Amino acid sequence: MSLLSAQQFERISAAVNDLTPSQLAWVGGYLSGLSLGPHNVIPFPQLAAANRVEAVAQLSVNTTILYGSQTGNSKAIAEKLHQAFKASGLASSLKSLRDYRPQHLKKEQRVVFVVSTHGNGEPPDDARTFFQFINNERAPQLKELHYAVLALGDSSYDAFCQSGVELDQRLEKLGATRWLARIDCDVDFADHATRWREQILEKVKQDDHSDSSPLPKQGLVQAVQQATIGSAEAPWTAELLSATPVTDPSSEKEVFHFEFSLENSGITYEPGDILAVKVSNETALVDLLIQQGGWDSNSAVSVKGNVRPLREALIDTFEITNVTRKQLQNYASTTQQTALAAQAADKAALVDWLYAADWLDVLKTYPAELSAQAFIDLLRPLQAREYSIASSLAAHPDEVHLLVKRVTYQHHEREHLGVGSNWLARLQAGDSAQIYIKPNQHFKLPKSDNTKLIMIGAGTGVAPFRGFLFEREARGLTGNTWLFFGEQRFRSDFLYQAEWLELVKSGVLERMSVAFSRDQAEKIYVQHRLIEQGAELWQWLQDGAHLYVCGDMHKMAKDVHAALAQIAVTHGGLSDEQAQQYLETLMSERRYQRDVY
Amino acid sequence: MTKPIPKGLNERAINGSDVERIKDQSNYLRGTLVESFANPLTGSISADDHQLIKFHGTYEQDDRDRRNERLARKLEPAYEFMIRARIPGGNVTAEQWLALDTISDLYGNHTFRLTTRQTVQFHGIVKFKLKQTIQAMDKALLDSIAGCGDVNRNVMCSPDPALSSINAQVYPWATKISEHLMPKSRAYHEIWLDEPQGRTLVAGGEAEEIEPLYGKHYLPRKFKIGIAIPPHNESDVHMNDIGLIAIAKNDQLLGFNVAVGGGLGMTFGREDTYARLATDIGFCTPEQVLDVVYHTVAIQRDFGNRQDRKLSRFKYTIDKYGLEWFKQELAARCGFELQALHPYTFTTTGDRFGWAETTDKRWHLGLRLEHGRIQDTEKTSIKSALAQIAREKLCAFRMTANQNVFLTEVKKNNKARIVNILKEHGYESDASHLSGLRRNSIACVALNTCPQAMAEAERYLPNLITKLEPILDKYGLLQDNIKIRMTGCPNGCGRSVMAEIGFIGKSPGRYNLYLGGGFNGQRLNKLYRENLDEAAILTTLEPILADYANQRETGETFGDFILRKGLLDQAA
């Protein structure tokens, strides 16, 4: 007997009869969500209200013009083509390959490339990332894409127009349709480029006004609200698309930018939300711990009723890198170490010792006979690590990004590694991670797009503001934004510098103030910049600006708060008490939001 | 030919290049430099300021070794500035040398470099330190005005003090010419040295007042002047827009033969660009020389091509309108005609190394440097050695056009101390232990800092020579003076096209090979083979060197031999 009756099958067939492939994919997700229970799907009215299904009907297909330029020739040709499109009333958009997110390719219908070749057949510098992306074996299939390539080169080199040739062939291999034959231009490219431009325009006009157009014209469902959501209980297994260090090698720290795929997950988030990542302990530390305890890696231990090998359980189930006072007391009593018990009772004395101590430190300093099971029973479950999301779904569809500093510190004469950041740092593109979203109601963009934003972030605390600003860019908003950023050194630690510069250039980011603490004799931090520009900052607050602070709770957030109070005193004429009251009011009105840790 | 029409001093060129627009709008080289340097978000400056900053003697560059890595890290390129001092004739005092040394440590990358135009440049200065650098130079009585840009550049002069009293008579002219042709705008002093702001643009007539020679738009392109004292031609005098050849009789300077229209830069893929040696056109007295250079510059200012910067050097103006036209125009402007040329002979473009005595009984040491780079390495510490020598005030310093240095004005009893200091720092005071090829080598900076470079030069030529030396040894040529030069692009800073063996980079690891330049700097070489990698360079050169060893005539230089054998007839 089949799973469905003939009538059921007929009803389903009729229901999906007129759906587009994208809609069908959405329905697939919806149904599988439904199979997990009705709470797993969003009811339709809410779904519609969420305005996530955007059926965009287009009269003429947009042509994306992309260029890779070293000396400016490709750029000039691309710009001319773009102007010609405009002059003919045809839709086109122009971007440098440096600024183009290659992940968008799979959503494109028509792309025209102008790309030059340099050195021994290499693409221009600004196209390198793009070429790496498409040449990667995991590059997406590009079935929808129709493309044309104009290659520039110098025939006195062996690898004449190599980049253009490579691109042309690679796109075909990825399933894209060559829409116009490639033209290879030598140093005297002007005439070829003009002819090519005319050909392109001719072809676009032809295709878009005839029924035999090879391109679908309308009704592309651009974004689909999916039905199931990753959760702590059922995290989503996300592929890591890329892991990039974003500090210079000369930096004293290592900060990484991670991009995870949410494709087909149905997961959504808003800028300001938190991503939780399930992590595991470093195997080297686990092995040292087992060795120190005198246990056997394979000895069976009972974990919530399941029997597991000790090593496995220590790797993925328990916290071993931090120890609480309570745990230490339990350890002392279990191992009958009266001296330790007495010590553990003295809270003040223990604070320093326990700060950043792990279980290896405990076992080494206070060795005792203890069974593997007894040890396991002392431990707490391993928590998912939480990070402020650094991306915006509107700008980075199907992706979620993190900015994470790799934590290492010397303690008890050993290097200690932060669990989450080091686990992430060990991942490579193509690996996967279990993730889910934790909505953060206390760190949200204002309801009105016209409200001014003052964003203050030090170090990786700048992450959510990347999400904020890209979200605003995607919504077509400019101005009304002021970002304060602090780090150690301009040259090595200016996290996301190239992106901020682009956002400043496009006007999405109206002002940016930076403080680099170690670039001069005296230490300068974000709070100093706040005070320096206190008058204007106060004016922004009078204009209704919302304040956001993200980063270290103990130092940065405290100092920033004090600086804000000082500004209210100096520029607002408030008393100290009134200033504190003022900030309290801002907080209660949700105009002063913090994401500090 | 239609009559050439001059551009009016304050008139913007019709269809001028974008750089013409930038100069026009710059308020005499100010542009938005102050704003650009105050922007804390980037180590770069605006595109327009990029052009203007050159007139202040500095270029924006970036560390190209790190460019892609930094882009991948979402960091802007490692922008940094190269700044080049204006040192006519290449002379500095011990105090100034020490100041230069300190600047490189405080603000630069702990090295500095003697250039092929007898001056000093620093690399690796970040935007936020440039002002301090210029102020430190100013304290040492040095400036970088017109170090680059569309103006007259550093004026060169044959450096060898052994050329007796003539040298002392000729030298001051390098400085006089440099100062006579300096831009007069106070932009440099206002922006870098905090001089109170002077007059800004007002309507009418101010161009003549603020920049009497250059006007609002300066020159169409860079302009170079050099002086040679025969029989030495260290500065390759004919590669200049104006070459001056000192003519003397009985130790008395009579005047200068004037040569015009030299220039080595060309552009790959542009058949209408070419290297050209200056043409000797006549003789002038010392009293006339300032007028001659001034009006020559003015003629180029008025008639040079301002539409296409690839064709805007003076050599193209000369070739477009003809030498006769130029001579007439010059005579009309000067109010006198040049006299007939005096005969002279050049024998070498190389530097003389080792100790020699001058007529005033003082000594000087010709010191060979590896492509002018003043740096301490694991093996030798020439930077520390020269700083120590300067600290003890044992000599003055004179940069040569071959990227070497003369330690001058040394008292006899200080010679041993200098030799000792050099020895303590692992450095030989003469170059006789080096091959003739290495002694006569020049390489430009190229990668990793020069934005023009398509291939390595300074970082590669020493290694290539190491690979050529066994071949030279095999054919008994190790001590022969053969002029080898390498540049990372065809712009010509390293004067590759005047070498007997010249290389111009085409792409990483690939070079065009040029052969047959004159040893005395009076003949350009020719393209022999294209796109050679190292293996091909070695296999191409070996049989030619072997033939040279076996078939040369007495005293025949390598370049002359190439020519006689007709090797260039089968060129690429």
Image: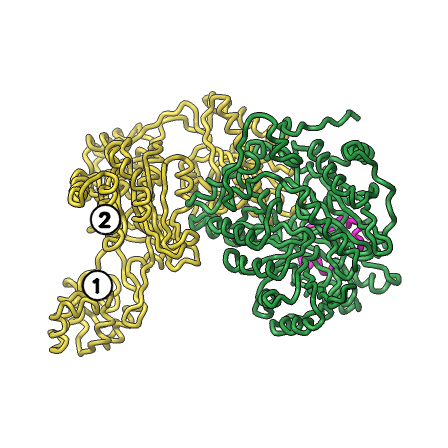
Q: Is residue A219 above or below residue A294?
A: above
The disc placed on residue A562 is 2
The chain identifier of the residue carrying mark 1 reads A
State the residue in front, A517 or A59.
Answer: A517
Q: Which chain is green?
A: B
Q: Which chain is yellow?
A: A
Q: Is residue A261 magenta?
A: no
State the residue in front, A85 or B235.
Answer: B235
Name the residue beneath numbered marker 1.
A318
Residue B426 seen by the camera = yes
State the residue in front, A568 or A191.
Answer: A568
| Distance between the alpha carbons at the discs numbered 1 and 2 | 39 Å
Residue A38 seen by the camera = no
- Counting from the top left corner in percent of width and height, residue A264 is at 31, 42
Q: Amino acid at mark 1?
A: Phe
Determine the image quadrant of residue B165: bottom right
Q: Is residue B531 magenta?
A: yes
Q: Amino acid at mark 2?
A: Ala
Looking at the rendered structure, the secondary structure element under dot 1 is loop
Report the magenta residues as a range: B516-540
Mark 1 or mark 2: whose residue is earlier in sequence: 1
User: Alpha-carbon neighbours of circle 1 within 10 Å: few (<14), some, or many (≥20)?
Assistant: many
The chain identifier of the residue carrying mark 2 reads A
Q: Is residue B34 above or below residue A192?
A: below
Q: Residue at x 24, y 74 (%)?
A: A296
